[in-house]
Amino acid sequence: FLIDMILQFFLMYPVQRSGVGYSLERRQGYIAKHYLQTWFFVDLASIVPIDTISIVTQSEELKRLKAVKLVRLMRLLRLARVTRLWRRFEARTSIRYGKLAIVKFLVILFLITHWMANLW
């Protein structure tokens, strides 16, 4: 996740231009500012190893905090990025809709299977 955070400072993002459509923002300063204003704090909170810190410090307060569970849920917010990446993939490929629907179905099936295995 740390490598992903570093890469986010360099990845272009789409910007809507008036009447023209979308273009990619290429200026490094704008890219960094956009990331800091959108996903940076969610990403930062998701990589902090709260469980490890609570075990090492033997702090009962940290063990009892319900905020730990909240931080874990914040990690799930990263999945919202997947939809954005999927839309980019759909726009850039010339795959027919039927094949794309099958791929999307298999990805969702794999994800649900993974979650169910973790819950088991």
Image: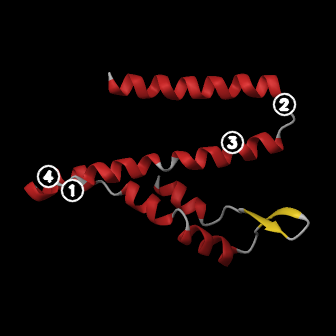
Task: Find the distance from the CA under tag 2 to the CA under tag 4.
Answer: 50 Å
Q: Which mark is in front, 2 or 4? A: 4
Element carrying mark 1: helix
Precedes in sequence: disc 4 or disc 3: 4
Q: Please determine whether, in this image, residue 94 is positioned above or below residue 49.
A: above
Q: Please determine whether, in this image, residue 24 is positioned above or below residue 80.
A: below
**Image marks 3 and 2: residues in contact by CB distance under 8 Å:** no
Precedes in sequence: disc 2 or disc 4: 4
Report crowding for label 1: few under 14, some 14 to 19, many 20 or more residues within 10 A (C-alpha). Answer: few
Report crowding for label 4: few under 14, some 14 to 19, many 20 or more residues within 10 A (C-alpha). Answer: few
Report crowding for label 3: few under 14, some 14 to 19, many 20 or more residues within 10 A (C-alpha). Answer: few
On residue 111, the disc is none
Q: Give the residue at mark 2.
A: 95
Q: Please determine whether, in this image, residue 14 is positioned above or below residue 36.
A: above
Element carrying mark 4: helix
Report crowding for label 2: few under 14, some 14 to 19, many 20 or more residues within 10 A (C-alpha). Answer: few
Q: Which mark is in front, 4 or 1? A: 4
Precedes in sequence: disc 4 or disc 1: 1
Task: Find the distance from the CA under tag 3 to the CA under tag 2.
Answer: 13 Å
Q: Which mark is in front, 2 or 1? A: 2
Residue type at tag 1 = Ile
Q: Give the residue at mark 4.
A: 64
